[in-house]
Structures are given as structure tokens and as C-alpha cells.
Image (spheres, coloured by chain):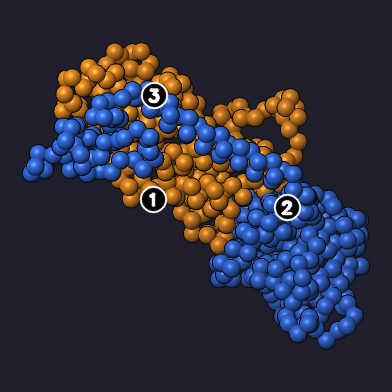
Chain colours: A orange, B blue
Amino acid sequence: MIVNSIEKSQIQSAPGKVLEKKHPLAIRWFHWINFPVLMTMIWSGLLIYWANDVYHVSRFKLFPEWFYTRFHIGSRLSEGIGWHFLFMWFFAINGILYVLYTAISGQWRYLLPGKTSVKEAFQVVLYDLHLSKYHPPRRKFNGAQQIAYSSIIVMGAGSLITGLAIYKSVQFGWITALVGGYETARFIHFWLTIGYCAFFLVHVGQVVKTGWNNFRAMVTGYEVVDAGEAVI
Amino acid sequence: MSEIEPDKNGESERDAAPTDPEFNSTLPIIEASSKDITGYAMIDGMTPVMANGQLVDAEREIRRLSRRSFLWAGVTLATGFGAWKWINTRPQVDGIGMPFRRVLEFNEKLTRSYFSPSRLAATFPVSLAREPVVTGEIGMTDPSFDTNDWRLIVEGMQGSNEPISLTMADIKALPKFEMVTEHKCVEGWSRVVHWAGARFADFAAKYPPAAIRGAVPGYVSMRTSDETYYVGLDMPSAIHPQTLLCYEMNGEPLTAEHGAPLRLAIPLKYGIKCIKWIGTIRYADTKPADYWAERGYDWYAGF
């Protein structure tokens, strides 16, 4: 959306930069609270996993024996459980509030993928990989972002559901059955965590690439843009 | 975003959107309602920075906003760091920091308030049954001992001030019950196991607890003969229909390493509660001592 009613004299008298509101205060809080909470969940989850590290990628153990020896990882299961079952509350409450907020405030309009998101996501990926010079028109969140930010919420819900399926497999036995049983719940719960780690790497990479102005918007809420390029 | 539909006055509907309440500049900020005076159309999500009808330096304004926001970030970070420090410096309560212990107890309270004896652990076809991992040997009975010499001591039974002594025949006289359930270790692994034995509920009906301080005791304590391993159970879990005093596993008599002659199978709880080599059963009105709960784990440990 172009601010076409600014008169020419005003543009010339001003530096031609305007502040664009990007992230509402609530979303910034949800985001930054989630960051250390999710980190704690992943770390304590690993302490639990390491007590019985069953998962392989084909023949390769995810954490080979030398890993434990090298980093002096002893048994810290009870400690992991302690952190996990405390921070699960923060993770769940923060996540639920975020979803409620985006639903009620209308922010979901920017976040949910639309009809063109998949096509746009491909264009963004090709552009980012320097395979194409075309970048789709600037929007608050492009198709790739919409898919990523919506998927991460679905993953979060998946973690909560499979977590409950493991944690209370009798009192919430119907949930355990729904996700395919205890072992399956544990399997999904674990691989979702690997998914968060992958998301985190790409996300941080993109933030670094996009630059300070974009990062700062997640703290202040505002981005500095050229008056003529203001978009939402 | 789609085009903003102009209303009948030719203005954007979103013009009425209030400015961000945070955006509390010391500079006079043009109000949405004054757009007619300046001819400046404010659109959703964009806050025009105006001073005396002129656009001011957006860079200056973002610096001011940044100072404030990053100050908040700093305060939040410091608070978080303080909370983390606090959590890590609390005294230990039974092998784990006090905040964790309190939260485990809170979670237990919540679970127990939701508990229903009609909810059963999932059962499986016998064909899926396997041998569970052989775990701890704490409290193991000498494998060479004779089952005929074994006695189960029951403390706190109704009508008996003294502990009573039962034989294997007494246990086997109770109705035999079989189940194929998942044995889940607190470490994470699980195995489907075929158990057979007497329901604890039947045992408690035959050898009922004496009232303690005028009430039915709410807990059961089980200990190995040598008292080195012990578990505490809440009564609702103990008398659940799937809680068995087991003497057979996967169709065979229990082996020494799996808890012969008598062990507990309680699919409502983690394996740490499935005590092997039971020697004593005591009814109690307070939470009985529990080996792993004293070592940093959840006392309840129930699904």
C-alpha cells in the first residue's frame, strides 16, 4: 500500500523514511517468552532422551557413544524431568495465548497461508538459494514465512498432544490411542523436537540475512521503510 | 494484503485505526482524526511521524523506540536470569530442587483430581508380549532361596494389631487375573508384557486395612524383604483393577531377576513403582517412603 496522498513537498522536506508498525506488542512478548521456554523444553527433553537414546537415522545413532564420553554426559534424567514438567506449563500457556491472540486480533490473516503461498514459497526459496532473481512482491509475511510460521504452531500443538499422550497415557488414553499408541507418541514427540531445531537454524539464518531493521522490528514493533514502499 | 476498500467518503475504513498505544512520542503525533487538516492519509500499521505538520526523522524516532524496547528486553532478560538463578539455588528436597519438587506435587494433585478408576491402561494381544529389560537388583532375593520359605508380611490389617504373615498359597488362593499391558520405564522405553497374578483390590478385600485415625488409610507401602527397595502407592491406584500382585510373567513363573516370588505390575505407573521381591505390605495414612522419589523422581509417577 503506497502512501500516495503525501504531498510532494512533504516527501522532499522529510528524509522519506517512515515507521511501519510490523509486530504487535503481544506477539513480540509471546515470541520472546517462547524462545527461552522452548530452549529449556528441548534441553530438558534431551536430558530425558539420553536416558534411553533409541532413535537412529538408518544405521547411525543420533547421539553416538563418543558424544556422551566427550561431553561427560552422565545420568541427569530426574533433573530433565523436573525442568520438563515445570516448563511444559509455560510452553503450553504461552502457545495457547498466542493462538488465541492471533485468532481474536485478526493477525492470523497475515500468518495463515493463502492460495498463492506455496507458489510464493517456491519463489522465495529459489531466490534465497540464488537460483532465481525474482522475489515476489514484498508483504508482511511472504508465502514461505506463512507456511513456516503456521507449521511451527501445528508442530507446537503436536508436541503438546503427543506430550500429554506420553505423560498421561492412561487418564488421557484416548489421546494416546489417537496418535497411534505410546511408542508412536514418543517417536513423534522426539522428531518434532528435531523439527524445531531445523526451524531454528533456518529462522536465525534468515534473520541474520535480512538484517538489523527486520530484527529490531521484533523488539520495537516498528520497521523503518521508505515512505513510498510502506507495505503491510 | 488486499486493497483497502474505500468507504463512501472515499477514505479508508482503516483510517479510524487508533495509533499504537506504545507510540508515545514526545513529539506531537498527528491523530487519525486530523488527517483532513494535513491531508495525510494514515493507513493501517503505519504511524506517520509528524511535527508541526511535517514529517520528522523516522530514524530518530526508531532510536527512541529502540532505547525503550531494548531497555524492556534488558529488564526481562535480567528477570529471567534471576529466576533461573533462583531455581538453581533452592535447597534440594529429596534429590531435586525445591521448585521442581513443588511442581511435581502440583502436577500430582492435578492428576489425582482427574483420576478415574474406570480408565484402563491399554491392553494388547498376547502375541506382542516380550521380556522386559532386566532392571535394578536392589532388594533382590537370593535366587537360590526356596519359595516355600517365603512369607508376605502385612502390616496395618483390620482386626490385627500385630503384622500377619501370608504364604504363596494364600496369594494364589485369590482369583487369578491376567493382563497384557505396556510396561513403561521412566527412562523412556516400554515393553508389552503378559502378567498374571492376584488383583491388589482382591487382596485388600480379603486382608482389609484397619482404619487409621478413624479413616480408611489412603496409601500402601511395599518393601522388599531386605527393606532396601520400597515404593509408596496412593490407594486409588493400588486398588485399580489392573494393579496385580504378580507371580507369572509371559506364561511362566516369575524368574528371580524379574522379582520372584512376588512382584507388582501396575500399568498405571512407571516401572519404578513395579517393585520386585515384595516382602512387606503396609497400609498407611501418609505418603510412604519411595526409593526413587527420594532420589529426585516424582513420587506419584502415574500415567
- Which of the 4 quarters of the picture holds residue B40? top left
Front-most of B14 and B136? B14
**Residue at (26% x, 29% y) in the render:** B52
- Which of the 4 quarters of the picture holds residue B86? top right
Asked if the residue at tag 2 contacts the one at tag 3, i.e. Cβ–Cβ closer than 8 Å, the answer is no
Quarter of the rendering occupied by the N terminus of chain A: top left
Residue B287 position within the rendered picture, expressed as x and y whole percent measured from the top left:
76, 67
Residue A136 position within the rendered picture, expressed as x and y whole percent measured from the top left:
26, 22
Which of the two discs, 3 and 2, labels the residue nearer the N terminus?
3
Q: Chain of mark 2?
A: B
Q: In screen coordinates, is A190 left or right of A230?
A: right
Query: Label 1 sits on what residue type?
Result: Leu
Residue at the farthest bottom position: B159
Task: Examine the rendered structure and indicate whether residue B224 appears above or below residue B71.
Answer: below
Q: Chain of mark 1?
A: A
Residues marked 1 and 2, same chain: no
Query: Label 2 sits on what residue type?
Result: Met
Pointer 1: residues within 10 angstroms few (<14), some, or many (20+)? few
Asked if the residue at tag 2 contacts the one at tag 1, i.e. Cβ–Cβ closer than 8 Å, the answer is no
Residue at the farthest left position: B8
Mark 1 element type: helix
Pointer 3: residues within 10 angstroms few (<14), some, or many (20+)? few
Task: Examine the rendered structure and indicate whether residue A123 appears above or below residue B242.
Answer: above
Name the residue that disc number 3 marks. B60
Name the residue that disc number 2 marks. B98
**Residue A5 visible in this rendered orientation of the protein:** yes
Front-most of A14 and B223? A14
Name the residue that disc number 1 marks. A100
Query: Label 3 sits on what residue type?
Result: Arg
**Residue at (76% x, 29% y) in the render:** A72
